[in-house]
Image (cartoon, rainbow, N blue to C red):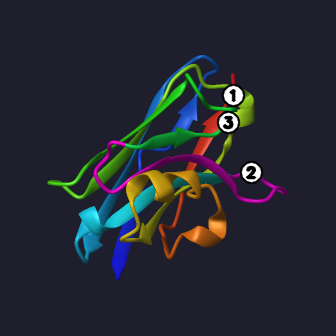
């Protein structure tokens, strides 16, 4: 199994930026497709972005496309989410998640947006966008 720890959350003004990190330990990081999800108070957990095992396939929720950038470093067993042009509606607890998979990456990325697709989760980090 893999253990995940998020960091980098905080309070930022609208239009500002934050960079979230997810550090993984345990089994081979490069065997996992990785995703970011978020959950606002009173709402269901929702997909934000995902990156395939090699880092070559990316997918984003429409609400964050062109503002957020997901990346991973398999040598360091880390994943990041660069968040720019933040909006109040981005306020949520952000979670990183891991899905062990051997399926072709084009197939995996096409179905990487569901909460139930992931096996392991971090504890979450709070992001608050407010003036």
> Residue 110, percent across and down?
56, 52
Tell me the mark number nearer the camera, choosing from 1 and 3.
3
The answer, for residue 107, to whether it is visible in the render is yes
Q: Quadrant of the N terminus?
A: bottom left
60 drawn magenta: no
Lower position in the chain sequence, tag 1 or tag 3: 3
Taking the image as shown, residue 18 lies to the left or right of residue 91, namely left
Q: Is residue 104 above or below residue 82?
A: below
Residue at (55% x, 24% y) in the render: 67
Taking the image as shown, residue 41 lies to the left or right of residue 71, namely right
Report the front residue among 92 and 1: 1
Lower position in the chain sequence, tag 2 or tag 3: 2
Q: What span is in magenta?
A: 39-56
Residue 90's tag is 3
Residue at (61% x, 25% y) in the render: 86
Q: CA distance from mark 1 to mark 2?
A: 14 Å
Secondary structure type for disc 1 = loop
In terms of secondary structure, what is the magenta stretch mainly? Answer: loop
The answer, for residue 94, to whether it is visible in the render is no
Q: Residue furthest bottom?
A: 1
Q: Residue furthest right?
A: 42
Q: CA distance from mark 2 to mark 3?
A: 8 Å
Where does label 1 land, which residue?
130
Where does label 2 land, which residue?
40
Q: Residues within 10 Å of mark 3 (few under 14, many from 20)?
A: many
Tell me the mark number nearer the camera, choosing from 1 and 2.
2
Q: Residues within 10 Å of mark 1 (few under 14, many from 20)?
A: some
């Amino acid at each position: 199994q893999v253990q995940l720890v998020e960091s980098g959350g905080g309070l930022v003004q609208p239009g500002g930026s934050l960079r979230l990190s997810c550090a993984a330990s345990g089994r081979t990081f490069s065997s996992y497709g990785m995703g970011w999800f978020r959950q606002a108070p009173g709402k269901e957990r929702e997909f934000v972005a995902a990156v395939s095992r090699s880092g070559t396939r990316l997918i984003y929720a429409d609400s964050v496309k062109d503002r957020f950038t997901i990346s991973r470093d398999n040598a360091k067993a880390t994943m990041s989410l660069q968040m720019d042009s933040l909006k109040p509606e981005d306020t949520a607890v952000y979670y990183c998640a891991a899905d062990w998979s051997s399926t072709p990456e084009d197939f995996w990325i096409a179905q990487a947006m569901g909460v139930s697709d992931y096996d392991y989760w971090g504890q979450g980090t709070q992001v608050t966008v407010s003036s």
